[in-house]
Amino acid sequence: MTLARDSGFTLIEAMVTLAVVAVVLSAGVPSFSAMIKNNRLATESHALRTVLSAARFEAQAQRSAVTVCRSTNAIDCSTGDWGAGYMAFIDLDGDAQLDDGEQLLEYRVQNTQGIGVSYSEAGGILRFDSSGNAAESNGTFTFCDDRGAVAARGLVVSVVGRVRPAVMSEREGSTHIVQDHDGNDVTCNVV
């Protein structure tokens, strides 16, 4: 005769298992949260870079000025946080407003909850001339979340209209914050 053994967990086994799960979760959840925030910043940066590159291409292809500006309605340029949305259009008369007869190229409404997007140019308007240059409106777009400048991303628009990601300084004693078009650390307003 064999005795049937009860199957299941003892109280000690269950407590050890829960302790191991708690340790794993406490180590993994913060890095998962940081990964989500990093992906949001990267997504918004890539979306704007795509629009800027397309606007520059259209300026060169159509031999006409193209304006990129913050907009919440695809009709008017506005000031403030670029995180609300932006548009690119062929600006035949150079007035930085989408008029009748001017072609809207791109419009993006942002869903950037918790992400602030700013442009270093005071006017807040980027203009590519018919050669694709951004000589009078080159600058840096900065993407920030609640972690501040240490986690910020940036896009640098050069004088010749080239759009590239902002990078950290390689200098000794670097702050490990991405650099703007003038080689300075980007700054973030609290989001």
Image (spheres, grey):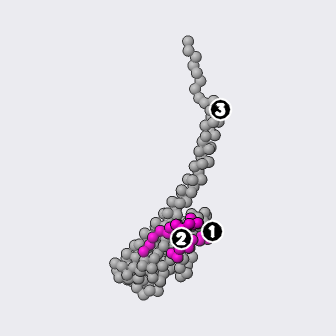
The residue under label 2 is which amino acid type?
Answer: Gln
Location of residue 161 (image quadrant): bottom left
Between residue 92 and residue 169, name the one nearer to us.
169
The picture places residue 34, in percent across and down from the top left corner, at 56, 57
Residue 137, numbered label: none
What residue does disc 2 label? 179
- The residue most toward the top is 1
| Residue at (57, 19) in percent of width and height | 4
The residue under label 3 is which amino acid type?
Answer: Ile
Q: Label 1: how many residues lie within 10 Å, few (<14), some (14-19) or many (20+)?
A: few
Which mark's residue is nearer the viewer, 1 or 2?
Answer: 2
Is-magenta flag for residue 154?
no
> In which quadrant of the rendered image does the N terminus lie?
top right
Total marks drawn? Answer: 3
The residue under label 1 is which amino acid type?
Answer: Val
The picture places residue 137, in percent across and down from the top left corner, at 48, 81
> In which quadrant of the rendered image does the C terminus lie?
bottom right
Q: Main secondary structure of the magenta part?
A: loop
Residue 12, numbered label: 3
Q: Is residue 176 above or below residue 6?
A: below
Q: Is residue 125 left or right of residue 104?
A: right
- CA–CA distance between discs 1 and 2? 18 Å
Between residue 73 and residue 84, name the one nearer to us.
84
- Magenta residues span 162-191
